[in-house]
Image (tube, helix red, strand yellow):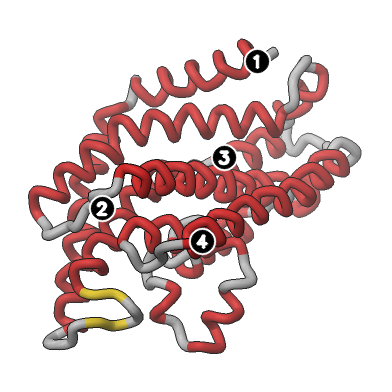
Amino acid sequence: MLSAYLEVIRMRFLMMLAYRVNYYSGILIYALNIGSYYFVYKAIYGGQEMIGGLTLGQMTTYVAVSWMGRAFYFNNLDREIANEIRDGSVAIQFIRPYNYVFVKMMQGLGEGVFRLLLFTTPGMIFIWLLLPIQFPSDPGLWVIYFVMLFFSFLINTQLNIITGLFAFFLENNEGLMRMKRVAVDLFSGLIIPISFFPGWSKSILEWLPFQAITYLPSAVFTGKIAGAAIYQNLGVQVLWFVLLLVPMVVLWVKSKTRLFVQGG
């Protein structure tokens, strides 16, 4: 069975490879986004040395790492699942000898590996040549960052699968998917670091899973989070991964009694 799931990863990687030109152009688009944020924050900082616990150099690195990290953990599994539910093709998954939800996670991982190798890595090198990014010199920090980035993928994928499975109950969950995407980009710290939020809203966001997707790994990479706090925040990611398994499994079990096909 493990070999079957590995084959799912390989097939999704090859499928993404067939459309790799889109991702090469995506590197330029992400570079423009990062460059725009850099000049905006440069103007915001002005003569100030530090804002929200981040220097301008750290902020530049944070923006670059956050957006390039998004290229790895981003996927459209919620939309894929919703489409399969609407056209009824998900019914075939009920009789196949594998777990549908786990297969979707493996497909997302195959896409993520492709993005990491052919989007995130060359994109980060390209941005490094243009902007004053400060890479950490400690190899151990790189290892921890990639572990945390992997958990970012897992948590984001769980949220996508949960959102997609709601199509069993809502019939059309397009609005929910749009709301989820905005919430992830805004409340994860991708657009604005969590440390920039007002105190009351920051306290609320620390109780939500979104910060575990972008802010925590990027803050560790830039040195905003250091020492023992690194492992505490890694523990936060692990905790959210475990907690999100519950609604994901419950929704999938309940969904099996809700299937009906729209159209013909």
Label 3, label 2: how far apart the Cα atoms are: 33 Å
The three-letter amino acid code for the residue at tag 3 is Leu
Q: Quadrant of residue 168?
A: top right
Q: Amino acid at mark 1?
A: Leu
The number of numbered discs placed on residues in the rendered structure image is 4
Q: Residues within 10 Å of mark 1 (few under 14, many from 20)?
A: few
For mark 4, give the secondary structure.
helix
- Is tag 3's residue or tag 2's residue first in the polypeptide sequence? 3
Image quarter of the C terminus: top right
| Residue that label 3 marks | 77
Mark 1 vs mark 4: which is more N-terminal?
1
Q: Earlier in the sequence, mark 4 or mark 2?
A: 2
Residue to which mark 1 is pinned? 2
Q: Alpha-carbon distance for marks 1 and 4? A: 31 Å
Report the quarter where the N terminus lies: top right
**What residue is drawn where x is 31% and y is 61%?**
222
Find the distance from the CA under tag 4 to the CA under tag 2.
26 Å
Q: Name the residue beneath numbered marker 2.
A: 136
- Disc 3 from disc 1: Cα separation: 21 Å
